[in-house]
Amino acid sequence: MISLERGARETELAAKVDAFIRDKIIPFERDPRIEHHGPSDDLANELKALARKEGLLSPHVGEAYGGLGLNHREIATVFRSAGYSTLGPIALNIMAPDEGNMAMLEKVASAEQKEKFLRPLAAGKVRSAFLMTEPDGGAGSDPSMMKTTAVLDGNHWVINGVKTLITGADGAAFSIIMAKTGARATMFLADMKTPGIRIERVLDTIDRTMPGGHAVVSLTDVRVSAEDVLGQPDEGFKYAQVRLAPARLTHCMRWWGAAKRAHDIATAYACERQAFGKPLVDHEGVGFMLADNDIDLKQAELTIDWCAWVLDNAGHGAGTAESSVAKVAVSEALYRIADRCVQILGGRGVTDDTPVHQIFRDIRAFRIYDGPSEVHRWSIAKRIKREHKAKASH
Amino acid sequence: MISLERGARETELAAKVDAFIRDKIIPFERDPRIEHHGPSDDLANELKALARKEGLLSPHVGEAYGGLGLNHREIATVFRSAGYSTLGPIALNIMAPDEGNMAMLEKVASAEQKEKFLRPLAAGKVRSAFLMTEPDGGAGSDPSMMKTTAVLDGNHWVINGVKTLITGADGAAFSIIMAKTGARATMFLADMKTPGIRIERVLDTIDRTMPGGHAVVSLTDVRVSAEDVLGQPDEGFKYAQVRLAPARLTHCMRWWGAAKRAHDIATAYACERQAFGKPLVDHEGVGFMLADNDIDLKQAELTIDWCAWVLDNAGHGAGTAESSVAKVAVSEALYRIADRCVQILGGRGVTDDTPVHQIFRDIRAFRIYDGPSEVHRWSIAKRIKREHKAKASH
Amino acid sequence: MISLERGARETELAAKVDAFIRDKIIPFERDPRIEHHGPSDDLANELKALARKEGLLSPHVGEAYGGLGLNHREIATVFRSAGYSTLGPIALNIMAPDEGNMAMLEKVASAEQKEKFLRPLAAGKVRSAFLMTEPDGGAGSDPSMMKTTAVLDGNHWVINGVKTLITGADGAAFSIIMAKTGARATMFLADMKTPGIRIERVLDTIDRTMPGGHAVVSLTDVRVSAEDVLGQPDEGFKYAQVRLAPARLTHCMRWWGAAKRAHDIATAYACERQAFGKPLVDHEGVGFMLADNDIDLKQAELTIDWCAWVLDNAGHGAGTAESSVAKVAVSEALYRIADRCVQILGGRGVTDDTPVHQIFRDIRAFRIYDGPSEVHRWSIAKRIKREHKAKASH
Amino acid sequence: MISLERGARETELAAKVDAFIRDKIIPFERDPRIEHHGPSDDLANELKALARKEGLLSPHVGEAYGGLGLNHREIATVFRSAGYSTLGPIALNIMAPDEGNMAMLEKVASAEQKEKFLRPLAAGKVRSAFLMTEPDGGAGSDPSMMKTTAVLDGNHWVINGVKTLITGADGAAFSIIMAKTGARATMFLADMKTPGIRIERVLDTIDRTMPGGHAVVSLTDVRVSAEDVLGQPDEGFKYAQVRLAPARLTHCMRWWGAAKRAHDIATAYACERQAFGKPLVDHEGVGFMLADNDIDLKQAELTIDWCAWVLDNAGHGAGTAESSVAKVAVSEALYRIADRCVQILGGRGVTDDTPVHQIFRDIRAFRIYDGPSEVHRWSIAKRIKREHKAKASH
């Protein structure tokens, strides 16, 4: 049964983030230091400094690492607010893949690894990457196809393979590398300067807000010390699952904020611009699009909050099924919203004169990143079949 | 912030209703006493007797009238479960328009009126009607077009007009009549045997589960005593608003249960029926439809719970805007579900061999009853414009 | 390259059918002899007599059997016009399954069989059935699952099996029965009074315009003389293919007319009915639905004409792939049109006060009859793969 | 009635263009001279030289100007083939706005103007612009809002105003300027070096294939000789209509080819890439998307051919209504295709590793350029109302 009460801390925090984004971050959106894949490191550091000053940096990590130790529901509230500017998640240091990496390190890494990797990451001093997806389907939608291998050689693992669509690899200080170790998989922590790690090229992608873009990374005889195994050897797929559901959901949260921004811009335009003798909003062809946005935003918000509630309350490992539902429903809804906003803005909508164009492009990619909608529908159908069989066998 | 905890009472009640519907009501679904517009009065009384025995009759009304005094969130839980059988809402005495009439009488009627009208209605002894909608648009989507008038003549009001799509009029013991009294409107309570009230014809409609169907009712010099004014004269539109939001939402709840039933039938069929060498569910063309059903059901449930929460917690008169959002989103989602279920069942889906055919037809009408989706989108767009102007004027 | 010129004969014929439907047939649409599955035989005969008088009966068959010997493109023009009334196809004797049966008999039957079966059918004196689809998937979307068998016993075949969704079986004079003869299949002509043919029940289906409805028919030791094999033994699947593509397309044609009718009714209503101070059509929410109808009607018409052109011009057996494209595209488009028309009419749309309600129901079934859209998409995907492989292997 | 026969010349021409694009143009698609808004002038000239050599340059203009004098149906065939490469329309010199400008000059310009402006344009020696759309809605979807004015001063007109979204302005040799002359409008031919014509900025737009991009152009006391009026003064709106319908349709043609290309790339990928143990195409979730592409491509092709047929055969000024239908139907269909292709390609689909990403972006803009879909629906609804009134008044 749904309750919409928010705790005092959460309400206060939301208001604070809203004001911070509006007053401090949005003014930077036309800064010349914004490049093809988002802000330069210089600009990013300036934005993070502003968030640090407000006590808003890395709010999702524990207080031991400078955060606020928020639960998933509180994270939803804060991240949605941060997503309202395309620069917001960078300012708060909650952008993918860093945010998901921090969450996983906090859960799985050893004390030494936390000091070495998590602390500077949570402090916003470095960026990181997560080397999982491979070309030709390896570890993309179908993880069983992973081809990268790690072989033990004395006290080191030797890793070989190729990874693609690696967000933020260009400029990252370290990465988490997923590799097959026999029939199972292991995660490794590696400095990006380790010999054999090579950024082959940065892809030219439709989205533009992830610093470093998305790269193809080759791994050639990369030697990683056994103490840099993340967690236990052979537990890589299990940890990937741990990372998976919350990471999907934080994507939903951030882009929810972006879609809300697009909707607000389209609303303002529709209320002020005249056509055929009245404001656009009074044309039902436009007004109904805004109404559908309003409905989609509300349902996306409820779906995020529901899934966050499951992550907070259900037992360990729960939330994967719910996060599949949330990923499809929210990404498709936010995309419809962004598309309608482009359409409402007309010619202006396909230019960079407003952030709507960029939001549209970023969210197009969201329907594919972290599993295309089709893969999630496939896994939901599998679950429905499983549940039916369990029920029928009673 | 969403919490999905359910109180102990609610959880227990839901389980009880689920079992009651499954074990006691579904077996009647092929009873020969089911007629063109649902069960005969004879069958309906038998079903209500079963619910009465379980303490489940009219659960939404206060204990003073034999109910359980549920709040809107609890009502959502119980009504969704009841809707799982097309006979469920009749058994629990929570079908439109009786359920909405009970809710309004409980809030607005005088003590004497409650004894005379509410008590027998809540006890499941009689049915009622709500005479609002008029042909040619009067008081349909645009209430300002209402043409029925009431004129004071001594201690009586004299009512003249024509009403249409009056659910349950045929067989109702009494009705609530909405009529213009000058520039405003008043509600009247009237025995359906009052001279001048005439059921012109019962329409042949696509839906088939509302006892009495939907009638055209003429009102010719109908004399109603001044003491049978419901609430205060000239407050009719205000009371209509009071009735409106919750009545829309209970439609969503009941039909949610029906759509869930259709989904379960389609799931069972898809898991058991083979085509081209494997079960239908393993064909993505079918499995993806079930996945989309799963997503739509969850989002519809969340939307209903959210709106119920607003009705429970926001101040007097709140919830109209939220109920517009819920009405569009839920009716369109449930219709998509019903349509997919028909399609999954193939040839069988368009026959009466399963309840899916009837559920599809009933929910088609739901996209129009209580305001077509277009009218709700129109009012949502108006609200968006209003909110923008308020914000812009700061 | 498309040319839209119509021959003089075709133009004249279209005008004649349009006038006939408007002046002679539509006035019968509220005749009390219209029953649950369309007009009684009495009314049907009266309508056919009117068409016969105008020289419009069975226009698709050759002149030898009283028709006009139209090609597929001319058939498209005439059938679309006839479909404008729900009674039109019955009046012209071009309703399924009779129309498809006539076409197949004309192509495949022996001279004797033509005299015995085709002549009275084309003359509108009797009705026929086509016994192909089986319960549990047999010969439904997946023909390989057919379970009905025919075994030779002396000079007779003995047929056993169960067929379902057999349109027009109730009241048919004869039927074409499809049965497995070893690994292949054979078609048989049989008087419906042949011992062992039993109509188990007539299904209660969503559509209501096919005389006789759709029945479950059991075949128990049905003995058919060897001379009543249609065409050659073991060629049943081949003949089914011959029947298939044109039969799908004539469904598209007839229902196109029905959708056009619904659109015209909705247009008239939208132009005349006021809401919120202006005609409905001036509300973009309604006007855009009519615009989408206009687009869908035009594209459906072009798609039908294109497929008819292929049937007329490509070699023997051609048109199956094209008719799959046409079946999906047209049935889905006509359904969208019918659904929009219901929605535009509001409360009236879900009643029998206009033919729109019935048209909506009939066309819902069309998305399943002659292969659900999913089965056609499946076969189109198979063709795309085949074509890619052929191209890639060059 | 549709005929799909193609004349021998047309068939031959289509094969020639197909081969030219495949063998000569596609190899240039990764040429480093492709810039943010398409090929550099240097590369464009190289491509045009190739087309000139094949006799394929400016095939739509009359032989007097070096073309082939094709009719609209033949243009459809050639332009669709040319659109198969994003560089094809540039090579053939049939890109907007040059192609539409040539067509209009051929119809409206004086002999002297043709020599001066049309001849070098048709020869592929220069580019041109069409200065119509204005910021703040002027002459965008609602032409009555145009604010640019031309005032006669002796033998010259003096033009003042601002234009926006002016395709190809940057680098154009001359332009056609639309300006208000009193209550009506006039078109002017002007060298882009005329004092007072200033390109304020080139917009950063989502599409990337139109050389010169889309610019904001200011006009400050631009003096144009009276002999450079295009056609007659005050006839600007009439000429705009002449240009309008064919220009919309050639957009449909070119982008049809682009969508076909995307579909072919997605088909090849789906047939070759494995996931979960079988090729993607054998997953119905993917196969059905390809099937829907197939259907959409066919219907778009038919719709283009139908509208071209109307332009060829109906009287002067015809085709505006038909081109609105075609514009909505085709742009929306091609966009669905492009979107599905991105989705099928998964991560690769949102990168520049295939042309699909660019095609998706270009076609997104097409739903807005030459009138957003909503404006066309609006005008179709107006026509439906007009036709109903005309019919009802008989």
Image (cartoon, coloured by chain):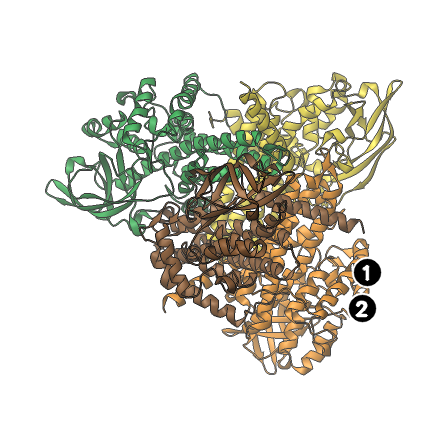
Chain colours: A brown, B orange, C yellow, D green
Mark 1 highlights which residue?
B24
* Residue B11 percent coordinates (x, y): 72, 66
Q: Which of B67/A205 is in front?
A: A205
Q: Is residue C20 visible?
A: no
| Residue at numbered disc 2 | B54
Count up the numbered dots: 2
* x, y percent for residue B80: 69, 61
Q: Residues within 10 Å of mark 2 (few under 14, many from 20)?
A: few
Q: Give A184 or D197, whichever is nearer the viewer.
A: A184
User: What type is the residue that disc 1 sits on?
Assistant: Lys
Cα distance in 3D space between marks 1 and 2: 11 Å
Task: Say which element carries label 2.
Answer: loop
Question: Could you say which quadrant of the image residue C373 lies in?
Answer: top right
Circle 1 chain: B
CB under 8 Å between callouts 1 and 2? yes
Name the residue nearer the viewer: C285 or A219: A219
Secondary structure under tag 1 reads helix
